Image (spheres, rainbow, N blue to C red):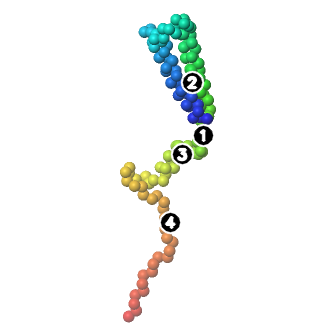
């Protein structure tokens, strides 16, 4: 659903760009090429339609944007990025330098064996 609203916002923004280019500006805009349409509908009617379409597209973009925020997919993990970064930093030794492979930081328990006895001296 989120992807649908994003696509609708993109389509509405493309149409908005085209409509703004068609609008009559100080230099006449691209609407000046539609002289026959202005004669049939009248200059005032053509600009009213283009203005209403512009406002409609702007409203549609706002509505689609708000709806897309409502349907944003949620993350699957409950941990934050900062927590993940802290965990990654704990697994490396503080003496490691960048570019040098990390050493194993897990400590092996000391072997609790009895010390090896020195061999008995031969009796002469």
Mark 4 neighbour class, 10 Å CA radius: few under 14, some 14 to 19, many 20 or more: few
Return the disc, 3 or 4, that comes first in the chain's sequence.
Answer: 3
Closer mark to the observer between disc 4 and disc 2:
2
Q: Earlier in the sequence, mark 1 or mark 2?
A: 2
Which of the numbered marks, if any, corresponds to residue 109?
A: 4
Q: Secondary structure at mark 4?
A: loop
Q: Is residue 43 visible?
A: no
Q: Is residue 36 above or below residue 80?
A: above
Residue at x-position 51% and y-position 18%: 19
User: Whole-Å distance between the Cαs marked 4 and 1?
Assistant: 42 Å
Q: Earlier in the sequence, mark 4 or mark 1?
A: 1
Residue 99 makes an appearance in the image: yes
| Residue 74 - label | 1
Left or right position of 109 against 100: right
Residue 38 in picture, x, y percent from top left: 52, 7
Q: Secondary structure at mark 1?
A: loop
Query: Closer to the N terminus: mark 3 or mark 1?
Result: 1
Who comes first in sequence, dot 3 or dot 2?
2
Residue in the image at 55% along x and 27% along y: 9
**Number of the front mark, 1 or 2:** 2
Q: Report the Cα–Cα distance between label 3 and label 2.
A: 36 Å
Label 2: element kind: helix
Q: Nearer the viewer, mark 4 or mark 1?
A: 1
Q: Quick check: marks 3 and 2 in contact, CB under 8 Å?
A: no
For mark 2, what is the residue?
61
C-alpha gap between disc 4 and disc 2: 63 Å
Which residue position is annotated with label 3?
83
State the quadrant of the N terminus: top right
| 100 w.r.t. 123: above or below | above
Quote the CA–CA distance across marks 1 and 2.
23 Å
How far from the left and from the top, in percent, is residue 97? 38, 51
């Amino acid at each position: 659903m989120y992807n649908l609203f994003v696509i609708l916002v993109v389509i509405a923004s493309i149409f908005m760009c085209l409509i703004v280019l068609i609008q009559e500006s100080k230099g006449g805009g691209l609407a000046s090429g539609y002289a026959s349409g202005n004669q049939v509908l009248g200059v005032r009617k053509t600009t009213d339609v283009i203005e209403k379409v512009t406002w409609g597209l702007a409203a549609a973009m706002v509505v689609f944007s708000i709806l897309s925020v409502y349907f944003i997919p949620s993350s699957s993990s409950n941990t934050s990025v900062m927590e993940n970064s802290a965990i990654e930093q704990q697994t490396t030794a503080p003496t490691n330098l960048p570019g040098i492979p990390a050493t194993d930081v897990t400590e092996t328990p000391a072997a609790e064996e009895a010390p090896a006895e020195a061999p008995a001296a031969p009796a002469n």
